Amino acid sequence: MVAAAKTSNAIVNRRNAKGNSRPENRLLPVCFLWPIVSGWLFLYVWTVQNKVHVVAPMLGTCIFGAGAMSAIVSLHNGC
């Protein structure tokens, strides 16, 4: 989440220096984070079975949560 916040701030600051100060500049990191988040959610859904060890769905849930929070933090960091 810290990396997403730093990346979002760096992108916004670089674009502000060029005169492009639109609020939509915070959406760029989210465009890359949400496909990753949905992939890990798919892993979670796929592994929730009796035949799969309990660690696999927990890994999917953990990375899904971290990715989702990173996307949210990158959007609301500069408000």
Image (tube, helix red, strand yellow):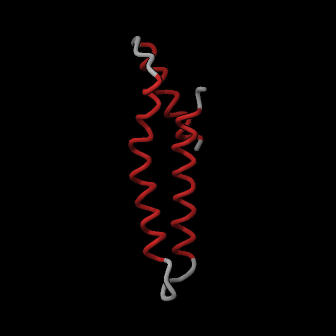
Q: Position of residue 58 (x, y in %)?
A: 57, 70
Q: Is residue 62 left or right of residue 21?
A: right
Q: Position of residue 52 (x, y in %)?
A: 49, 84
Q: Is residue 24 left or right of residue 58?
A: left
Count up the numbered dots.
Answer: 0
Q: Position of residue 68 (x, y in %)?
A: 53, 50
Q: Position of residue 25 (x, y in %)?
A: 43, 27
Q: Is residue 30 above or below residue 56?
A: above
Instruction: Give the quarter of the image for residue 17.
Output: top left
For the N terminus, which image quadrant? top right
Residue at image coords 50%, 78%: 48
For the C terminus, which image quadrant? top right
Q: Is residue 3 above or below residue 56?
A: above
Residue at image coords 59%, 32%: 77
Q: Is residue 41 left or right of residue 54?
A: left
Residue at image coords 39%, 13%: 18
Q: Is residue 3 left or right of residue 39?
A: right
Residue at image coords 39%, 44%: 32
Instruction: Give the quarter of the image for residue 6.
Output: top right
Q: Residue furthest bottom?
A: 51
